[in-house]
Amino acid sequence: MLSAELAAQIAARLSALMTEEAATLRVALGHLRAERAALESGDIDVLPMLAARKSEAYARLAQLGDARGALIARAGAQPAKAEIDTLFASGPEWAACRQPFADLLTLAREAHDANQANGEMIRAQMTSSQQALAVLMSAAEQASTYGPDGQSSTLTSRRSFGSA
């Protein structure tokens, strides 16, 4: 069991950490929304820049998540929602952690959903692009040229199978 003083110190640090984590998730959500808008408008030139910014935000989120997990473990809890809820309800020193944790869960769910939706949109656009490319490749294989007599002829393989 933690002393009240140590619990208060951990709770204060944890609250600040989760508040920063929530702010970083809001930044990542902004990038996800911008990515969605770019995908919808066909502005693919901005996607690499957005992907880099998203990666930076996710890297920071990973660091913050690791630190949060370490503090929760130091407080004697496992990183499962039920255990965290129990920890935060165990005394008044944890009261400041309840809202940042709730915000964090809501934002994480929203980011997950946005990321899934963007992924679906990207997959649909890739499928469409692959189908268009297949049509173009098929058309290129059946392209016609004009011979010396002015008549069109379909290109065939230049390989001669009958000669040795």
Image: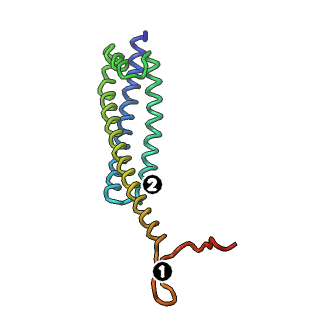
Q: Amino acid at mark 2?
A: Pro
Q: Is residue 139 above or below residue 31?
A: below
- Look at 51% across and 76% down and name the residue there: 155
Look at mark 1 in the image and give the residue it sits on. Answer: 153
Q: Amino acid at mark 1?
A: Ser
**x then y, percent, for residue 90:** 33, 13
Which one is closest to the eye, mark 1 or mark 2? 1
Furthest residue toward top: 1
**x then y, percent, for residue 105:** 33, 31
Task: Report the label total.
Answer: 2
Query: Is residue 48 rendered to the left or right of residue 99?
Result: right
Which quadrant of the structure image shows residue 75? top left
- Look at 40% across and 14% down and name the residue there: 5
Look at mark 2 in the image and give the residue it sits on. Answer: 48
Which quadrant of the structure image shows residue 48? bottom left
**Of label 1 and label 2, which has the lower sequence position?**
2
